[in-house]
Amino acid sequence: MHLVFQLSPMESLASALHGTLDWSKRYNIALGTADGLTYLHETCKRRIIHQDIKADNILLTENFEPQICDFGLAKWLPRQWTHYNVSKFECTFGFVSLKYLYRVNKYFCRNADTSTLSRCSYFAPEYFMHGIVDKKTDVYAFGVLLLELITGRKAADDQQQSVVIWVKPLLDENDITELLDPFLGDGYDADEVDCMALTASLYIEHSPILRPQMSQNSTNDSSKRSTSACLWHPYPFLFLDL
């Protein structure tokens, strides 16, 4: 049996983002990825937790439409289940908390390659602490992805700094202009940037209860995707499932 997939000539978001990707493309990539995750979490006959959302796993078509790929770590979550616990047998070195590793092996943290650190930067706190896998772990990873789209920075840079740690003080001070990728210059929609930054700040909340569901901030209606309209509600926390 052969599996044939659509060609993604623009490679991955990771390769395109840290180059010369304009704001409109970044925004549409965010929209499309949000719709894809919403489908996996809510619409798909069997709910799927991707568990490895990152820029490397978002492929781009010739029109820069995002395609979520690499389902090697994905979990099927039955409707009656609220979450899935990853057992110690499923864990690999890359799944272990970097804080824990630093306590037991400082050499690892000083010498871990950027790709390993970057991947760990997408992992939600509850995944590190309790091995919990659910929709909110994907939401957290998507929040990190939004920060990459806004800032142009990698999830973890060559100095081993997480984009989440770098962004937090700026988000707390609502200093959005300091977040922006310098490459963008003045070529961006301020309302879209504000909405995306607010959404990202909620998606990377430490507590999963405070993170919105993907379905609360996604739409499949292309008519709502004008540059004057913001996909994310200005106050998405009004729709939280508390």
Image (cartoon, rainbow, N blue to C red):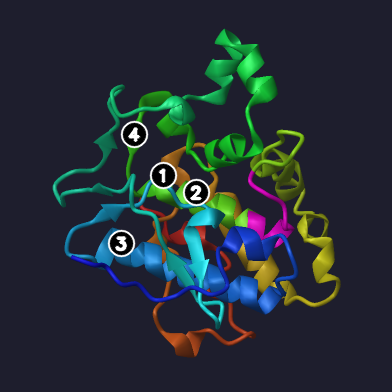
Q: Camera-side residue: 80 or 21? A: 21
Q: Secondary structure at mark 2?
A: helix
Q: Residue at x 85, y 75 (%)?
A: 186
Residue 153 position, x and y percent, is: 72, 52
From what the image shows, is residue 199 above or below residue 127?
Answer: below
Q: Which residue is mark 4?
A: 132
Disc 2 to disc 1, C-alpha distance: 6 Å
Q: Amino acid at mark 1?
A: Thr
Residue 14 visible within the image:
yes
Question: Is 6 left or right of 151, judged from the image as shown?
Answer: left
Question: Is 167 left or right of 205, judged from the image as shown?
Answer: right
The magenta segment = 148-155
Q: Which residue is mark 2?
A: 141
Residue 23 position, x and y percent, is: 70, 74
The mark nearer the N terminus, 4 or 2, is 4
Residue 214 position, x and y percent, is: 40, 60
Q: Secondary structure at mark 3?
A: helix
Do tag 2 and tag 1 residues touch (Cβ < 8 Å)?
yes
